[in-house]
Image (spheres, helix red, strand yellow):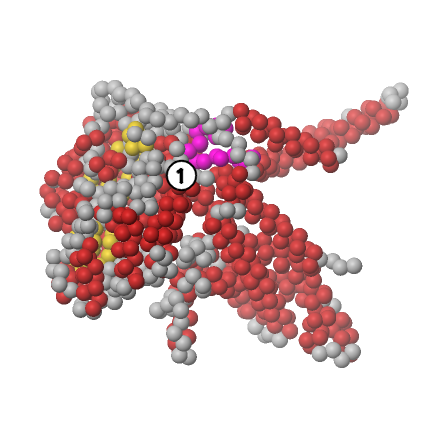
Amino acid sequence: MRSRRLAAAAGVVLAASVALAGCGRDSGGGQEEAKSVGAGKASGDITVWAMGSEGEKLAEFAKEFSTANPDAKVSVTAVPWDAAHQKIASAIAAKQTPDVSMIGTTWQGEFAKTGALDPTPSDLIKKDEFFPGAWDTTIVDSTSYGVPWYVETRLIYYRKDLAAKAGFPDGPKTWDDLKAMAKGMKEKAGAKWGLNLQPGKTGSWQSVLPFAWSNGADVASADKLSFDTPEMTEALAYYQSFFTEGLSPTALPDGSLEPGFVKGEIGAFISGPWHMGIVEEQGGAGFKDKYAVAQMPTKKSSTSFIGGSNLAVFKDAKNRDGGWKFVQWLSKPEVQVKWYQAVKDLPAVQSAWTDPALTGDTFLAAFGQQLKSAKAPPSIPTWEQIAAAFDLEVEKLCKQNADASATAKAIQEKASAIGTGS
Amino acid sequence: MAGAPAATAPARPAGATSPVRPAGSVRRRQRLRRALTGWAFSAPFTVLFVVFMALPVMASLVMSFTDLRSTDLRNPLAVNVVGIDNYIRLFSDDLFLRSSVNTLVFVVVGVPLTMVLALAAATALNSGLVRFRALFRVGFYLPVVTSIVAIAVVWRFLLDPEIGLVNNLLRLVGIDGPSWLFDSRLALPSLIVMAAWRNFGFLMVIFLAGLQAVPADLYEAATLDGATRWQQFRNVTLPMLRPTLLFGGVVTGIGYLQLFEEPFVMTQGGPLSSTLSVSFHIYNQFGFGNYGYAAAASYVLFLAIVALSVVQFRLLGERN
């Protein structure tokens, strides 16, 4: 009895595996042709998913679109960031997608590879209008699968008073400047730490890669990963030197960066535009005059990291044309400026930055300047996994004093084992 | 439900009124009817179990032999069967090995620690602390029912190197405390202590029930024989508690092998992967979209749990 049951179970497994073997992975891939979008006004229901504050504000914001396109109705579903990846993945698996969804730039490779995203129609969306780094995040296998919606990049935040005492009243310009300023802040200006750098942990690659890019390293393209280069090693060694020379903390508790910066214990740090609001709130009135932002320091170039979110239309969309028209409307320069005013998202469209709403603020202008050359890692489905391995090696580099070239080799080894997912 | 009487009612007349029929066929029919009735009653559970438990479990087992990734979502059947490749890869995966060692340390140190704490608290409550027994019982049990997120926030404050209570107390006696959660040698021990503190209340309640079930005359007899309190504990209490201890060990072992919440909310597996557990590693792999690989790791963890439970039954189970 028992053996018969076992035999039956084995049979089921065998049958299943044979059935699965019969339908192996087809090699596929390669460039995909975009279909054009019909002319005229948008019509019908357009369903949109968006995360975070974008999800909360978009429904109200889209009313203007409905006024211009009376036959169209935009319904926005707000999705919490935590649940968004899973929700979109489930929707793709069930072929029950919305027409349009906001997509984190690092998810682009994965979702495009499933074949669920519609290639961007070039007759409707013009590539040159966007920041080149942002546009690159939509490209998977040389086809664009979405449109940059908003962007962010990283700059050096520094205390003006401490920087002046350290001998850099206008902030650092080069790698040597940054090092000398951090040292001066610690030794001459009495700061506890000259510069806060992320010592590994999730997302530290976003602070390390700008140094590598600024040193001319081309770490990854769509089909090749090259972390093990002299440029990368040099950048890693430079990053590490801040820890070995005691200028950067290896164990800063969560939430103590901003108070430390306000108190003058931390002289500088690297972050994105959201930190302006945080430090000004914590610093109180007048703190805006006490700090400034500087471009990423130059070695061969000044290249920062570009992040943000894209908008994508799904192949399974019920209203594909309406979806693309809505996306096109959101990409208009004047709409991008209004969107900035509504939720403080920085425009991905370059011409929007000539608007006085953005040029008036020197801090913002600095971000706009950096965005022109900022870069993103290639949109490959395995990037998150490679980044996690990268973060772990960076942690060893910063905390255990691992050798920089050995770190570069280890990253390369792990990354090639993971592959580009193609 | 309504089908049950309807199904059994005609069976009896059929058997009673036609003696011509061979008795065997009637009995077979009766048995079939009864079986059908049984299945009808158990259908709600069976259907739910098959659809939501058995099928997913089977699917995940099949999945662990394929290279299914998140990019295959639209065509989940168009994947390659890779046999036991995923399992072989697991054992050359640095992080998986590291997480296995971490989890093993957590179980080997954490389970006995939790059980000893629970037994000590239960014994104390059972004998001496009669007056405030209810208060202590509530106090010790409170961490079990408190949300892990709240506990994590409080413990992160307690263990903070600068402003934390632990290091401030150490400073009082002149010791400069370490940064507990940021030190790769101390992070896992810190989590073990926290987990033991959090979970011993549950076992304490179980053990207390076990202690109260020990007949008082056994102790009387032991006292008459001149046994000390320690001897009574060793030779009366512990043997009588053996089934309770087995239960506590198995339940805690299963829970601790699936260590996830503590590192997830306290350390994110860091520093330097020193608190990365197997479950956390599996969670990460699912997050990276390596579904086949993560499923294989889950089955390895499942086998480890079965093995640990078997070992505990061997060690603490009934002895003849």
Is the residue marked by circle 1 packed among few (<14), some (14-19), or many (20+) residues within 10 Å? some
A147 is higher (above) or lower (below) than B171: above
B181 is higher (above) or lower (below) than B37: below
Q: Position of residue A413 (x, y in %)?
A: 40, 45
Q: Secondary structure at mark 1?
A: loop
Q: Residue at x 31, y 27 (%)?
A: A119
Image quadrant in which the N terminus of chain A is located: top right
Q: Position of residue A312 (x, y in %)?
A: 31, 32
Please tell me whether residue B75 belongs to the stretch shown in magenta. Answer: yes
Q: Position of residue B104 (x, y in %)?
A: 55, 56
- Work out whether residue B26 or residue A409 is closer to the camera in this orientation and state it: A409
For the record, the magenta segment spans B62-78
Quadrant hosting residue B134: bottom right
- Work out whether residue B210 or residue A383 is closer to the camera in this orientation and state it: A383
Q: Find disc 1 in the rendering and name its residue.
A: A419
Residue furthest to the right? B20
Q: Residue at x 20, y 40 (%)?
A: A347
Please tell me whether residue A115 belongs to the stretch shown in magenta. Answer: no
**In the rendered view, does B17 fall on the left or right side of B63?**
right
Tell me the kind of residue under disc 1. Answer: Gly
Chain holding disc 1:
A
Residue A73 in view, yes or no: no
Chief secondary structure of the magenta span? loop
- Work out whether residue B50 or residue B74 is closer to the camera in this orientation and state it: B74
**In the rendered view, does B230 fall on the left or right side of A418?**
right
- Work out whether residue B57 or residue B180 is closer to the camera in this orientation and state it: B180
Image quadrant in which the C terminus of chain A is located: top left
Q: Residue at x 45, y 57 (%)?
A: B274
Residue A403 in view, yes or no: yes
Q: Residue at x 76, y 80 (%)?
A: B226
**In the rendered view, does A16 fall on the left or right side of A279?**
right
Q: Position of residue A309 (x, y in %)?
A: 28, 39
